[in-house]
Image: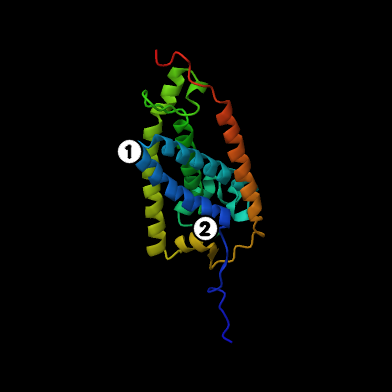
Amino acid sequence: MPSVSTQDKKHPLWDLPVRVIHWLILLLLPASWWTAEEGYQDVHQYLGLTLLVAVLTRLCWGLVGSPQARFVDFLRGPKSVLAYFRGAPNGTPGHNPAGGWSAMLLWMLLLAQALTGTVNSDDVLFTGPFYYVFDSDMSDFLAALHEPIFNILLGFVALHVLSVAIYERRRDQRLLRPMIFGKAPDRYGTGPAQPIYKALVIALLIAGMLFALLELAPEPPTDYFW
């Protein structure tokens, strides 16, 4: 039988939780935009809460998840980032030093987008579930950030897609297939992946805590419409 060269072998890179969350967010963003534009505020709210659970799950997975998903694996110091821009090799098949911080910033924007949505209001028929947690001035201030953050987020998503395309076409680094199938030609060698059920437990715990907070959220004042 013909032997498979080391270069042709596929080794684990991104585990299933990382990939599922990545593509789920990709679906949630345009769906959230469309439901907001069309006035389906109830659906928009559910999508936003789903986004919040997904982002929080990914952040937790970055602390306790599989080695290649953890922040300590790809968040490098300033020297490593500068060295990478000067042409130093990445050293791992995952995020490069600059891409790691770009991914973290993207997650922070997603988190801010979801959180500001919980205090949003159209001043007529819709108010976010946590609008009355704060006084009206604070809630209105946070709600006013919701759309600008989304516009910034769109810019970062566009840069992300452009970067992937450049790495795929110009640098011959396959980034898309590993995010679909989970494997890359390079040997990663940082330890076994965490069981998938752990990510599911984390997601369920976060969803449960969010549901509890929604149940405890203050109701609109009785004189709101007067």
In percent of the image, x 52 and y 53: which residue is there?
A: 20
Tag 2: residue type? Asn
Task: Kindly indicate the quadrant of the structure image that contains residue 152.
Answer: top left
In percent of the image, x 37 and y 34: which residue is there?
A: 147
In the image, residue 224 above or below residue 33: above
Circles 2 and 1, Cβ within 8 Å, touching? The answer is no
Left or right: residue 105 compared with residue 155: right
Which residue has dot 1 on it?
37
Disc 1 is placed on an element classified as helix
**Image quadrant containing the N terminus:** bottom right
Task: Kindly indicate the quadrant of the structure image that contains residue 124.
Answer: top left
Which residue has dot 2 on it?
90
- Residue 58's label in the rendered image is none
Tag 1: residue type? Glu
**Image quadrant containing the C terminus:** top left
In percent of the image, x 58 and y 52: which residue is there?
A: 69
Between residue 165 and residue 125, name the one nearer to us. Answer: 125
In the image, residue 43 above or below residue 194: above
| Badge 2 or badge 1: first in the primary sequence | 1
